[in-house]
Structure formats: structure tokens, C-alpha cells
Image: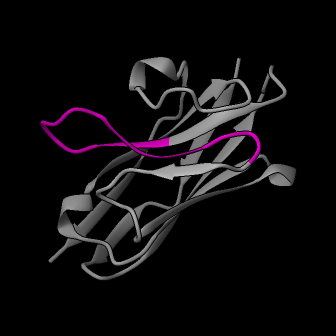
Amino acid sequence: QVQLVESGGGSVQAGGSLRLSCVRSKYTYSSYCMGWFRQAPGKEREWVAAIDSVGTTSHADSVKGRFTISKDNAKNTLYLQMNNLKPEDTAMYYCAADPGTYCYSVQRADFPYWGQGTQVTVSS
């Protein structure tokens, strides 16, 4: 099993910044595709960003240029730096893991391991 614990959420005004963290523990596999997803009330959970085991990143168009995914392998920690936040970024943010070297898919169903989420609220 894999355990994922997110932190770093909070309430900020539009234009502000937050950095989310996700610590991975109890891991079984040697490499993972790691992703961030978010879910706003009444909406489907959507993919935000992903990073594979060799450090290749991808970001959804809605956050490109504002959010940056990164990781620290020594700390088993995944990050999401969020700048220039907008009210539409308000959502519960989830960390997810898919065993494997590369991110072949960023579909929600392809990530078997999930954290409990951390809330991000952006006010105008």
C-alpha cells in the first residue's frame, strides 16, 4: 500500500500564492507517476498536474504558467506551487500516485492511490 498525506491548503485572496505538499510513505514500488487533482463543489474531479519518476512534468491548460509541480525524492514529497491564484481555483486538492516510471495517463481512474485532500479557497 501507499499512504499519501497532503498539507498546505488554506484561504488566500486572488493573486496570492500557496504551496501544497504531499508526503508519500509506506510505498511498495520503486517509482511512481505522481499527480495533483482538484474537485470543486458540484464538479467532477479534474487533473491539475503530473510528474513522472524521471522528472518530466505536465500541467493542465487552466493552470499552465501559474502552477508548478515538483518533487523532492529524498523527502518522498510532492509539491504544487500555486501562484496568481484565482477564485476558480477554489477546490479540494488531492495528491495521487500511480506505480510506474512514466505518466502514461492522467485520468483519475488510472491512479489507484489517493490522499485525503487539502482545501484551497481563493476569495476575490
Q: Is residue 114 left or right of residue 63?
A: right
Residue 32's place in the image compared with 19, above or below, is above
**Which quadrant: the N terminus?**
top right
Residue 43 located within the stretch drawn in magenta: yes
Picture coordinates of residue 56 (x, y %)?
66, 49
Q: Is residue 36 left or right of residue 100?
A: left
Residue sitting at 66 percent across and 29 percent down? 3
Residue 39 located within the stretch drawn in magenta: yes
Residue 6's place in the image compared with 122, above or below, is above
Q: Viewer-proximal residue, 80 or 10?
A: 80
Q: Viewer-proximal residue, 19 or 58?
A: 58
**Which quadrant: the C terminus?**
bottom left
Q: Which quadrant of the view contains residue 82? A: bottom left
**Magenta stretch bounds:** 36-54
Q: Is residue 102 left or right of residue 8?
A: right
Residue sitting at 19 percent across and 73 percent down? 123
Picture coordinates of residue 81 (x, y %)?
52, 67
Picture coordinates of residue 8 (x, y %)?
51, 61
Residue sitting at 16 percent across and 36 percent down? 43
Q: Is residue 80 left or right of residue 54?
A: left
Residue sitting at 87 percent across and 52 percent down? 74
Q: Viewer-proximal residue, 7 or 81?
A: 81
State the count of labels: 0
Picture coordinates of residue 25 (x, y %)?
76, 34
